[in-house]
Amino acid sequence: MKADSESPTESYAITGITLPSEQDYIPDSFGNNSFPMTSISADNNLTFKNICGGVKLKLKGTQIISSIRLEGKNNEKLSGSAVVTAYSDQRMPSIEMSADASKYVILDCGAGVQLDVAEAKEFIIVLPPVTFTNGFTVTLTDKAEQTFTNSTS
């Protein structure tokens, strides 16, 4: 299929997509099943496009982090059911979150991730394309169940 003026752009709605509200921490990466992609091909040559993006947090300290929660400050929808539209031309796919989508994402750090005072640890949280019009809030929970919250504007 050509993606030029002779061939009209086709679009395909993909239903049944769920962006997880809880993602697993993976060192220097993102958890399995948390970064969906799409591809359309008429000739079985697939070029995948990311549906989501990510936020990378670099943290230093002495705590053992058990989870990180990210939430928009303007009710942005960040996880749950969605419909993805993929296009036959070079456009990026679009995503529409369902009305009952969650407004937060939690990164589960399993047994915990030990922070270091000298070198930052990276934590990647996968998010749908979203503009945080009023910023976002990040809440860290450590192994002692203590929380630390920081917000952007």
Image: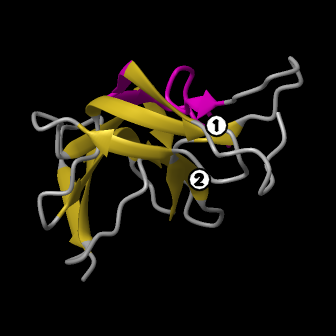
Residue at 68% x, 39% y: name it: 88
User: If the image is split into quadrants, where does the C terminus sit?
Assistant: bottom left
Crowd band around label 2 with a 10 angstrom C-alpha radius: few (<14), some (14–19), many (20+): some
* Kind of element beneath mark 1: loop
* For the residues bearing labels 1 and 2, Cβ distance under 8 angstroms: yes
Check the image and report above or below for 90 versus 65. below
Percent x, y for residue 85?
47, 37
- In terms of image quadrants, where is residue 108? top left
Of residues 54 and 38, the one nearer the viewer is: 38
* Kind of element beneath mark 2: strand
Q: Is residue 21 in view?
A: no
- Residue 27 is marked as 1
Q: Give the residue type at disc 1.
A: Pro
Residue at 37% x, 20% y: name it: 15
The reply to whether the magenta stretch includes residue 26 is: yes
User: If the image is split into quadrants, where does the N terminus sit?
Assistant: top right
Magenta highlight range: 16-38
Residue at 13% x, 66% y: name it: 74
Most extreme residue toward the bottom, as rendered? 153
Q: Name the residue tied to disc 2.
A: 122
Percent x, y for residue 144?
23, 37
- In terms of image quadrants, where is residue 99? top left
Check the image and report above or below for 78 versus 47. below
**In-image side of 30 versus 44 (left or right):** left
Q: Give the residue type at disc 2.
A: Glu
